[in-house]
């Protein structure tokens, strides 16, 4: 029997309005998100000869002015993105391969829903991919095996393989249980995205979620994972200083985003993913970096929403060491109201660190 070496399949889904080559209009500098950084950092082949193939998808709302509105506010295009990512896995997966999923913001919601879709459907054969829309309809209507919709969708399908294990799903600040962070989108998408399964399932082995402490926009409420009683995987949901895009990236300077980037990369590397460290070392983490204000006038009218910390200890909740460093040693008076327990040692939440980096050094002008 011919030996087939395993490979790694990596899906990277960027956030709304984020593209791989975006440029800061004020500074003229490129400011990639953490999804773009990790997609670029993954080596095509690891040192032991394992192929690592990357599928990167720009955020929805990036194909012109109309798409910016329909995609950004209403989430148009998300379903097609999920189907295309699923197809990529179908085309490339062989038994024994490892799957990694990464996403930011709406892209985080997308890859989590992709995992739910795979859990329901499994993997079809490559030449049956034109049945994917019918299968997605089953997912959309929450119709599982035995339902008329299921029988119709699978009538001509040669067969499916069971859902393969997902080695790691790593996300930055999943927002919107409805998948729609826009003000208008929250009104019109109230029921549209409730079918998405973004929970942990038995095929997910490891889950990492970087969450922004300082994001206060109501439509950007984070979608946390809850650990199922029967789930045997490893879950970490760590809080980082900054607002939504301080943690997931796209602001310049990006010292805070790089804290969450290296935390994620360290876990992925421990699970076997091999990255170009020379490239990643250009993105210095810095707990003293600029913290942006995302509360524009439109969101101020809606009123603030304070994200609640220390509510999910059993769900892998932790706080990253860089947050405490900013509070205790930072040049600014960083004192977020939702973690005041740390001042009097009353907080009961674990602290996680990133071992390979020196924190607090000045960020280079890259």
Image (cartoon, rainbow, N blue to C red):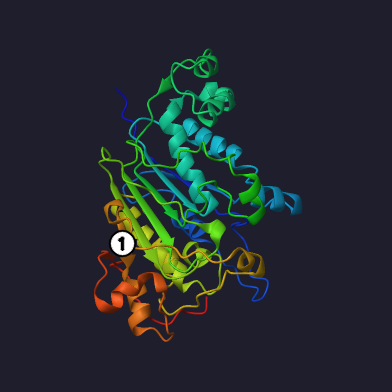
Residue 134 image point, x, y percent: 57, 23
As rendered, which of 6 and 216 lies closer to the eye? 216
**Residue topped by disc 1:** 318
State whether residue 265 is above or below residue 323. above
Q: Let me know if residue 129 appears in the view.
A: yes
Left or right of residue 82: residue 93? left
Q: Residues within 10 Å of mark 1 (few under 14, many from 20)?
A: many
Q: How many marks?
A: 1
Give the residue displayed 68% in from the left and 71% down from the top: 25
Residue 142 image point, x, y percent: 49, 28
Q: What element does badge 1 sit on?
A: strand
State whether residue 250 is above or below residue 78. below
Residue 293 image point, x, y percent: 56, 73
Give the residue displayed 48% in from the left and 17% down from the top: 147
As rendered, which of 291 and 361 lies closer to the eye? 291
As rendered, which of 92 and 129 lies closer to the eye? 129
């Amino acid at each position: 029997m011919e030996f087939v070496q395993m490979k790694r399949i990596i899906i990277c889904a960027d956030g709304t309005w984020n593209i791989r080559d975006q440029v800061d209009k004020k500074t003229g500098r490129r400011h990639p998100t953490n999804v773009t950084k990790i997609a670029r950092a993954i080596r095509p082949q690891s040192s032991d000869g394992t192929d690592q193939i990357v599928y990167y998808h720009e955020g929805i709302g990036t194909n012109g002015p109309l798409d910016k509105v329909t995609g950004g506010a209403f989430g148009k295009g998300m379903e097609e993105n999920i189907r295309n990512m699923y197809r990529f896995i179908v085309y490339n997966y062989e038994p024994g391969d490892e799957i990694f999923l990464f996403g930011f913001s709406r892209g985080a919601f997308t890859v989590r829903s992709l995992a739910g879709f795979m859990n329901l459907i499994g993997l079809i054969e490559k030449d049956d991919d034109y049945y994917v829309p019918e299968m997605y309809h089953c997912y959309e209507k929450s119709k599982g095996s035995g339902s008329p919709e299921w029988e119709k969708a699978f009538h001509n399908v040669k067969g499916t393989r069971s859902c393969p294990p997902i080695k790691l799903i790593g996300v930055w600040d999943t927002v919107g249980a409805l998948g729609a962070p826009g003000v208008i989108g929250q009104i019109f998408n109230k029921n549209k995205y409730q079918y998405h399964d973004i929970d942990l399932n038995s095929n997910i082995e490891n889950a990492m979620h970087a969450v922004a402490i300082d994001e206060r926009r109501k439509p950007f409420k984070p979608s946390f994972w809850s650990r199922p009683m029967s789930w045997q995987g490893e879950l970490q949901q760590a809080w980082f200083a900054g607002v939504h895009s301080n943690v997931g990236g796209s602001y310049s300077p990006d010292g805070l985003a790089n804290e969450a980037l290296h935390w994620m990369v360290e876990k992925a590397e421990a699970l076997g993913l091999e990255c170009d460290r020379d490239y990643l070392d250009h993105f210095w983490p810095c707990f003293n970096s600029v913290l942006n204000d995302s509360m524009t006038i439109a969101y101020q009218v809606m009123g603030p929403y304070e994200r609640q910390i220390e509510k999910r200890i059993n769900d892998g909740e932790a706080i990253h060491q860089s947050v405490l460093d900013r509070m205790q040693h930072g040049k600014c008076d960083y004192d977020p109201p939702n973690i005041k327990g740390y001042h009097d040692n009353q907080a009961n939440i674990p602290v996680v660190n990133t071992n390979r980096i020196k924190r607090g050094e000045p960020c280079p002008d890259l």
